Every structure is written in structure tokens, then in C-alpha cells.
């Protein structure tokens, strides 16, 4: 049995995407903008992957996404994860879940890798100032 409204999240680096999936006519909006106008195009293609894989299910729901933080590509990866999780949870279809996992595991599992923090006496995470003995 399908739920009425499903809220899911997707994360990548410092980007967080919050998604609401509800019964509708197949509209997908990212920060209140239709996905067809999302720029750059390479990020839009990445976002469209779960929608193409689940065409039958995606045409019967409305998806609203709010995303913040990070760069455009990490935002796109967070959005696609949130959309895929939302579609699987909304439909409850195990075949859809298996097709997402077979295509790319990152569709259903958020990437936990983050930037290593800067350390004292250095210019970054690993680089240090040169040590002089005299």
C-alpha cells in the first residue's frame, strides 16, 4: 500500500536535499523551480536518472526538493539520492529498489565522505610548513 506523503533526505559532502513525495501529476520542483530549467545541464542529467529508471512511478507523483550547501554537483548527487529514496518509500515496490541498486548503489545510500578538516601549523589537512633546525 502506498503512503500519502513521504519525506526523505539525501546527503553528499556538505549538501543536504530534503524531498517531499506526494500523489500528483509527475511534477518535479527543485527549490521551487521545475527540474527542466535546472542548470547546469550535467547536474540536471544526474538528477533525472532515478526519474528515468522509475518512469511509471514518477509520472504519478509530485516531488518537491529543497537543497542547500555544497557545490552544484554535490547538490545534484544529494537530490538524486533523496528522489530515489522517496520513490522507493512511497511506492513500496521491491523491484524498483532492486533496479536502483543494480544501476547505482548511491541512488539509495548517501555518500558519507566529507572533506578532511584543516590542522594547526598547516595550510590544509595534510600539508605542513617546512621545519628548520637552524
Image: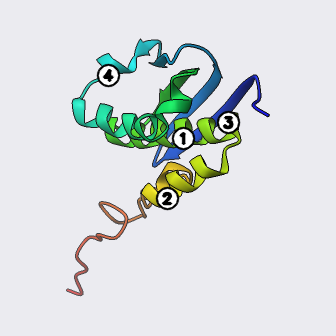
Relative depth, front residue between 122 and 89: 89
First along the sequence among labels 2 and 1 = 1
Q: Secondary structure at mark 3?
A: helix
Residue on which the image places disc 1: 84
Residue on which the image places disc 4: 38
First along the sequence among labels 3 and 2 = 3
How many residues crowd around disc 3 within 10 Å: few (fewer than 14), some, or many (20 or more)?
Answer: some
Relative depth, front residue between 28 and 67: 28
Residue on which the image places disc 3: 91
Disc 4 + disc 2, Cβ < 8 Å:
no
Q: Is residue 77 left or right of residue 94?
A: left
Reply above or below: 35 against 118. above
Q: Please report the residue visible at 42 percent of the width from the left and 64 percent of the height from the top.
A: 120
Query: Percent x, y for residue 26?
Result: 51, 18
How many residues crowd around disc 4 within 10 Å: few (fewer than 14), some, or many (20 or more)?
Answer: some
Relative depth, front residue between 124 and 116: 116
Disc 1 + disc 4, Cβ < 8 Å:
no
Q: Is residue 73 left or right of residue 91?
A: left
Q: Tell me the distance, in whole angstroms, between the alpha carbons under discs 3 and 2.
A: 18 Å
Query: Percent x, y for residue 60?
Result: 57, 21
How many residues crowd around disc 1 within 10 Å: few (fewer than 14), some, or many (20 or more)?
Answer: many
Image disc number at residue 5: none
Amino acid at each position: 500500500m502506498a503512503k500519502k506523503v513521504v519525506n526523505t533526505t539525501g546527503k553528499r559532502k556538505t549538501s543536504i536535499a530534503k524531498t517531499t513525495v506526494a500523489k500528483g501529476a509527475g511534477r518535479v520542483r527543485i527549490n521551487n523551480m521545475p527540474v527542466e530549467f535546472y542548470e547546469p545541464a550535467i547536474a540536471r542529467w544526474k538528477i533525472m536518472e532515478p526519474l528515468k529508471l522509475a518512469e511509471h512511478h514518477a509520472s504519478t507523483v509530485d516531488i518537491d526538493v529543497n537543497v542547500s550547501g555544497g557545490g552544484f554537483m554535490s547538490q545534484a548527487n544529494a537530490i538524486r539520492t533523496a528522489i530515489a529514496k522517496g520513490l522507493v518509500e512511497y511506492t513500496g515496490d521491491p523491484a524498483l529498489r532492486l533496479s536502483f541498486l543494480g544501476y547505482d548503489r548511491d541512488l539509495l545510500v548517501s555518500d558519507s565522505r566529507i572533506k578532511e578538516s584543516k590542522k594547526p601549523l598547516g595550510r590544509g589537512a595534510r600539508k605542513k610548513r617546512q621545519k628548520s633546525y637552524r
